[in-house]
Image (spheres, grey):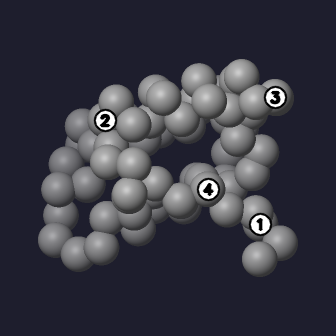
Amino acid sequence: MFYLSVIPEVFDIIALNIKESGLWATKGLNRLIIEKPFGHNVTSARGFNEKLIEDFDETDIYHIDHYL
């Protein structure tokens, strides 16, 4: 499980490095948890999400509010 509490501009860079390093392929629960904000507006949030689902299954990506 990988929890990303970083600025949206680096979501895809970090996620890709997790995958390319082989950490994603390890046994266990593979989930990518991304904390808000997901973008500066709806358009940028969708763009960030589209980049992520190029390399990850959409069911493995969780978008959460840090107040939960």
Depth order, front residue of 6/57: 57
Q: Residues under labels 3 and 2: Cα distance?
A: 23 Å
| Crowdedness near tag 4: few (<14), some (14–19) or many (≥20) residues, C-alpha within 10 Å | some
Which residue shows up at 77% across the image and 45% down it? Answer: 37
Sequence-first disc among 3 and 2:
3
Residue holding disc 3: 41
Q: Is residue 64 left or right of residue 42?
A: left
Q: Give the secondary structure at mark 4.
A: strand
Residue holding disc 2: 55
Q: Residues under labels 1 and 4: Cα distance?
A: 10 Å
**Front position among marks 3 and 1:** 3
| Crowdedness near tag 1: few (<14), some (14–19) or many (≥20) residues, C-alpha within 10 Å | few
Q: Which mark is residue 63?
A: 4
Percent across and percent down for residue 1 are 41, 67
Percent across and percent down for residue 19 are 28, 43
Q: Is residue 54 left or right of residue 15?
A: left
